[in-house]
Structure formats: C-alpha cells, structure tokens
Amino acid sequence: MAVVCIVAILGAIAAPYYGYYIQRGHLTEAVSTLSGERALLEQYYQDNGNYGAGGACGVTMPTVASGAVTYFSYVCVASSSTGGANDDGYVITATGNAAQNMTGFSYTIDQLSNKVSAITASGWNNPAPNNCWAIRKDGTC
C-alpha cells in the first residue's frame, strides 16, 4: 500500500511538469515556421521589390488543413513600414490552436526581424524586455 501511495504522489507531481514539457516542445513549431516564412518573404522581396500587395503577403502561410503545421495558425499582413503606399513591411503572427492545448501563445516577427511574444497561458510569463520568443515558463528565450 505504501508503494501505491508513493507512486500516486510522484504521479501527481510529475504530471504538470510533463504537460509543460509537451507545450514547450510544441513551441518549436512556431519558432521554426516563423523563421522559415521570414526567409521566404525576404526572397519574395528580392524578386518583387515588396512583400506583397494590398495588405496580402506574397508568400502563402502554412495551414493546419494542409497538414504543414499542427499547433499554430499563421497570418501574414503586408504593410508600409514608412507610411507610404508601398508594401515594404510585414508582420507574421503565429497563434496557438486551442484544439492542441496551445491557447494563450502568440508570437510575431516583422521585416526588421523584431520578435515579440504575447503569452497569456496560465503559469507562463512574457519576456522582459519583450524582444524575443519566450520558450520557457519564466519568460526566458
């Protein structure tokens, strides 16, 4: 009976930490996909002199429906970084999918490679200063 109690106590302690490590592992999808899409947008800019047209980025973002990604959805918005009419800027946002227990995680990157974390998931902190992608509960990158 004592062994059962000890195993139950260890299980109660280990389960939350296991969930944290699973979530942390899923964050790599957002970080690697955002970096890859940024590289594709830079290639697009070299070929076209802009990042897209009319607010739409010139590169198609990966989708869950296509099977390319699982834990995050991605949106890219082309804009003018100088206030003019040309699309010389962009922001790509990765937002965690609720169905995969990633609610509360959002990461962005722009044409200047500015990285921002917007984390509201329980027990997680945003980095301070918020100029990187937090991948640990304490907000470190």
Image (cartoon, grey):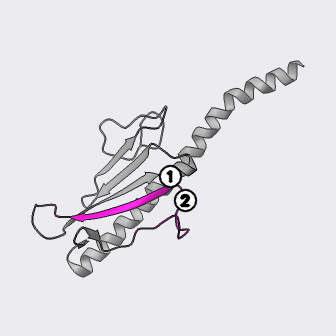
Quadrant in which the C terminus appears: top left
Quick check: is 125 in the magenta stretch?
no
Q: In this view, does 80 lie above or below 2?
A: below
Q: Is 79 contained in the magenta span?
A: yes
Q: Give the range drawn in magenta.
A: 61-82
Q: Nearer the viewer, mark 1 or mark 2?
A: 1
83 vs 62, left or right, is left
Q: Which residue sits at x=28%, y=63%?
A: 77
- Distance CA(mark 1)–CA(mark 2): 8 Å
Cβ–Cβ under 8 Å for marks 1 and 2: yes
Sequence-wise, the earlier of marks 1 and 2 is: 2
Find disc 1 in the rendering and name its residue: 97
Q: x, y (%) of residue 56?
A: 28, 70
User: Amino acid type of disc 1?
Assistant: Asn
Query: Is residue 74 positioned above or below 26 on the image?
Result: below
Residue highlighted by disc 2 = 70
Residue 11 position by quadrant:
top right
Secondary structure state at the residue bearing disc 1? loop
Looking at the rendered structure, the kind of residue marked 2 is Thr
Splitting the image into 4 quarters, where does residue 37 fall? bottom left
Count neighbours of disc 2 (C-alpha within 10 A) and say few if under 14, some if 14 to 19, many if 20 or more.
some
* Image position of 88 (left or right of 121): left
For this rendering, which residue is in front, 73 or 26?
73
